Image (cartoon, coloured by chain):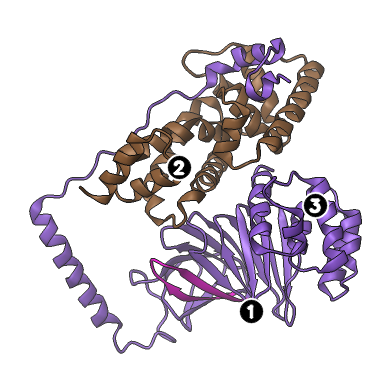
């Protein structure tokens, strides 16, 4: 049995396989282990992208990020650095995509399936208008449904930092929604 | 105590309403990867044979060739480039605006004032080299891509594992940790690094290292090496005190500690390894008050300057620096 197959079997057998173990298995050629990484990280990557890109395009950018990761993961020397590496790649991709778009593409947040309520698009825009520090964390929590500890585990932030970002971010969001009367 | 926003314990009607409103945007799509490529058996023989033949042809072309003075035609090994705006020189030969070529190992690319060169860094990124710059490809391979910026200005954008891409300047080496940054070297060799994404380790020839994450800048001076990174929007008092410290005034670390705010945690963290005794303690107190120190990073280890403790704290801080 190849090293990759062994690594993946270990990952499957131990459902709590670490990210580093999955990365090593992917580097040995396991597509299944990469699917495992996708399961753990696709929502945080989507949050990073959605913080900068219209919802209509965010899914495609996420797929591009993972396709890039699949192609380049063999060169990642420190498996434990995978979360930061992946999220940096997602930010680059999202920034590149946003630069090519019109400055305000409000329709891009409504043109998704199923169509969201106008208030949802307004709330998303309000989050995007917050300082960068809070945008990604709030989207991870309010859109993707991750808990604070899950956000900390997947981003490398400390749990206390996540808690502070969520509470300060929500306060700013509340002020903004209250002042603008946008939503909800 | 329950905290629904943080860990979904207890109740919070407002947060639940926002979740209901925004949950429709959650990502649910499955992974789409290209199907695995299946090589035909004859390809397994033909591809290595073709690679050997191509390598032999390249060797025949390269052997005995004097790169300097022969220009940089496209197609060979090296970094592809395109010149815009005004003329440049590559390998000692003129390269007019609008031309493209390949910068081979050992050759210099020199842009005239007003010229811009787009340089492709293998398959990991791109450089924009601005006018009046002098850049050399030191080496390129699977373990490292290395350039030397002797003078001028460039913007780098690299997506690669840490330490794969390095740019040497007369006083330091900018080691990429996965990022985008601007690098300027003036006529005296002063190096200015400004990081816009990810992080860069600016490493002096005497072993002094400055860790510069996104949103910070740092200057390296001949004879002194890399200074202390400061936030691009640092308060003038912090910036001035850090400059005094870099110029040799050890007591200025105390002034940084007193003036520092939340945006200056990068400066404080870098100062921990550069200070001693009471100065380090003052820096520690300031950083400890402005950030959340992991419980496994012990005060006595930080005050003793133990590298592992400083590194553990940096990794924790990185999460905040990279989210700005």
**Residue at screen point 58% across, 22% down:** A143
| Crowding near the residue tagged with mark 3, few <14, some 14–19, many ≥20 C-alpha atoms within 10 Å | many
The residue pinned by badge 2 equals: A19
The residue pinned by badge 3 equals: B287
Left or right: residue A57 versus residue B265 is left
| Crowding near the residue tagged with mark 1, few <14, some 14–19, many ≥20 C-alpha atoms within 10 Å | some
The x and y percentages for residue B22 are: 60, 17
Q: Do the residues labelled 3 and 1 touch (CB within 8 Å)?
A: no
What span is colored magenta in the figure? Answer: B134-150
Q: Colour of chain B?
A: purple
**Of B260 and A158, which appears nearest the observer?**
A158
**Residue at screen point 56% across, 22% down:** A145
The verdict on residue B145 being magenta is yes
Q: Is mark 3 on a helix, strand or loop?
A: helix
How many marks the image carries: the answer is 3
The residue pinned by badge 1 equals: B205
């Amino acid at each position: 049995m190849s090293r990759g197959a062994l690594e993946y079997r270990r990952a499957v057998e131990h459902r709590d396989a670490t990210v580093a173990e999955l990365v090593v298995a992917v580097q040995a050629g396991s597509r299944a282990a990469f699917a495992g990484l996708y399961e753990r990280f696709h929502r945080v990557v989507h949050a990073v992208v959605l913080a900068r890109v219209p919802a209509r395009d965010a899914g495609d950018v996420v797929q591009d990020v993972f396709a890039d990761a699949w192609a380049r993961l063999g060169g990642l020397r420190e498996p434990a650095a995978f979360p930061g590496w992946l999220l940096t790649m997602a930010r680059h991709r999202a920034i590149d995509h946003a630069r090519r778009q019109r400055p305000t593409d409000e329709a891009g947040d409504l043109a998704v399936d199923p169509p969201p309520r106008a208030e949802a698009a307004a709330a998303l825009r309000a989050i995007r208008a917050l300082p960068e520090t809070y945008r990604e964390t709030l989207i991870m929590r309010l859109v993707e449904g991750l808990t604070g500890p899950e956000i900390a585990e997947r981003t490398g932030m400390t749990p206390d930092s996540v808690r502070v970002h969520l509470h300060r971010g929500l306060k700013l969001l509340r002020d903004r929604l209250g002042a603008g009367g946008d939503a909800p | 105590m329950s905290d629904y926003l943080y860990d979904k314990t207890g109740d919070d009607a407002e947060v639940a309403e926002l979740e209901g409103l925004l949950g429709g945007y959650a990502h649910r799509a499955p992974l789409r990867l290209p199907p695995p490529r299946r090589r035909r058996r004859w390809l397994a023989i033909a591809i290595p044979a073709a690679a050997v033949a191509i390598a032999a042809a390249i060797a025949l072309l390269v052997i005995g060739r004097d790169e300097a003075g022969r220009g940089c035609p496209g197609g060979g090994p090296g970094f592809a480039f395109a010149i815009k705006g005004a003329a440049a020189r590559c390998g000692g030969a003129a390269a007019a605006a609008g031309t493209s070529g390949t910068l081979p190992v050992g050759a210099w690319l020199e842009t005239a004032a007003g010229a811009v060169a787009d340089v492709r860094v293998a398959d990991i990124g791109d450089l924009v080299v601005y006018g009046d710059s002098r850049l050399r490809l030191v080496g390129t391979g699977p373990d490292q891509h290395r350039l030397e910026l002797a003078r001028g200005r460039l913007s780098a954008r690299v997506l690669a594992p840490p330490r794969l891409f390095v740019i040497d300047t007369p006083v330091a080496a900018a080691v990429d940790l996965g990022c985008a940054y601007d690098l300027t070297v003036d006529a005296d060799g002063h190096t200015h690094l400004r990081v816009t994404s990810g992080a860069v380790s600016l490493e002096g020839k005497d072993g002094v290292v400055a860790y510069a994450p996104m949103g910070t800048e740092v200057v390296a001076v001949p004879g002194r090496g890399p200074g202390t990174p400061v936030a691009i929007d640092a308060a003038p008092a912090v910036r001035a005190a850090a400059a005094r410290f870099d110029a040799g005034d050890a007591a200025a670390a105390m002034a940084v500690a007193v003036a520092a705010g939340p945006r200056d945690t990068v400066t404080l963290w870098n100062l921990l390894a550069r200070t001693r005794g009471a100065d380090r303690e003052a820096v520690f107190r300031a950083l400890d008050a402005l950030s959340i120190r992991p419980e496994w990073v012990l005060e006595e280890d930080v005050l003793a300057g133990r590298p592992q403790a400083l590194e553990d704290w940096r990794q924790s801080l990185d999460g905040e620096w990279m989210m700005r």
